Image: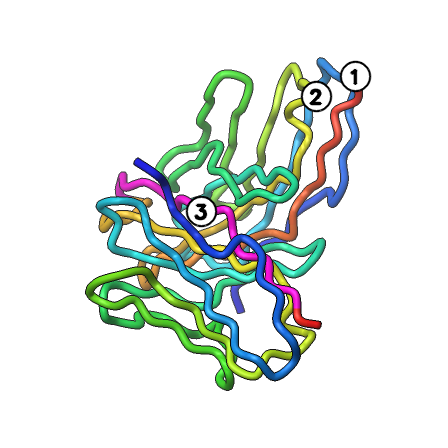
Amino acid sequence: GENVEQHPSTLSVQEGDSAVIKCTYSDSASNYFPWYKQELGKGPQLIIDIRSNVGEKKDQRIAVTLNKTAKHFSLHITETQPEDSAVYFCAACSTSGTYKYIFGTGTRLKVLA
Amino acid sequence: NAGVMQNPRHLVRRRGQEARLRCSPMKGHSHVYWYRQLPEEGLKFMVYLQKENIIDESGMPKERFSAEFPKEGPSILRIQQVVRGDSAAYFCASSSQSSPAQGGYGYTFGSGTRLTVV
């Protein structure tokens, strides 16, 4: 069935360093890939997304890359800050049917001051 | 715009009771999705609804769980005869009619309902 694998499960970086989270999806019909940030006790918040007709997208310190051939997509956070500490989820969505998301298992990012 | 509103934020039920979780989508959003998150795990799709219609319930257990999105009022996720394994955070999300792949916006999630079955 549809599956999204996410790595690493935990990631600690020093403040100011970069963080990279990688995801792999199985459904070749997936064409929309959002990333969510979830802070403790809160709902997931969309931070960036990418569509299948684009290879890279950047928004200030956050960027996402997509390799459709390899079915890989990655989140890059530069100049990390303590407030970036949270759990990050990738997701894949195929809009050929319903718009349901298949989520990765999450990455707990800790930015050390 | 108040965003996606879920209530209650916390719900405690004894085994065998019923749990009713409510979700009011963002203004202008006609698509509602329910997801379940077990502790330390990702979000699992349960059901996708539009007004008065269940579009996809492939992730919802066949027994004890039901969902509705009436013409008027919030979407309701109902769990009958709850068991300890139902303890989880239940998130509702809404989106507009447009497909996110064709330029529409992705989901907006609510803050969730944390269900504890004792």
User: Is the same chain shared between marks 3 and 1?
Assistant: no
Q: Is residue B47 above or below residue A7?
A: below
Q: Is residue B81 above or below residue A101?
A: below
Seen at 69% across and 21% down, the residue is A18
Seen at 58% across and 44% down, the residue is A89
- The residue indicated by pointer 3 is B109
Q: Specify whether A17 is left or right of B93.
A: right
* Image coords of residue A17 (percent x, y): 72, 17
- The residue indicated by pointer 2 is A82
Q: Which amino acid does label 3 sit on?
A: Phe
Q: Which amino acid does label 2 sit on?
A: Pro
Q: Is mark 1 on a helix, strand or loop?
A: loop
- Point out the stretch of residues depicted in magenta: B102-116
Seen at 38% across and 67% down, the residue is B76
User: Which mark, by number, is residue A113?
Assistant: 1
Q: Which of B9 and A27 is in front in this view?
A: B9
Q: Is mark 2 on a helix, strand or loop?
A: helix
Q: Which chain carries label 1?
A: A
Mark 1 and mark 2: Cα distance apart in space: 6 Å
Mark 1: few/some/many CA within 10 Å (<14, 14-19, 20+): few
Q: Can residue A3 be seen in this view?
A: no
Mark 2: few/some/many CA within 10 Å (<14, 14-19, 20+): some
Seen at 62% across and 44% down, the residue is A41
Q: Is mark 3 on a helix, strand or loop?
A: strand
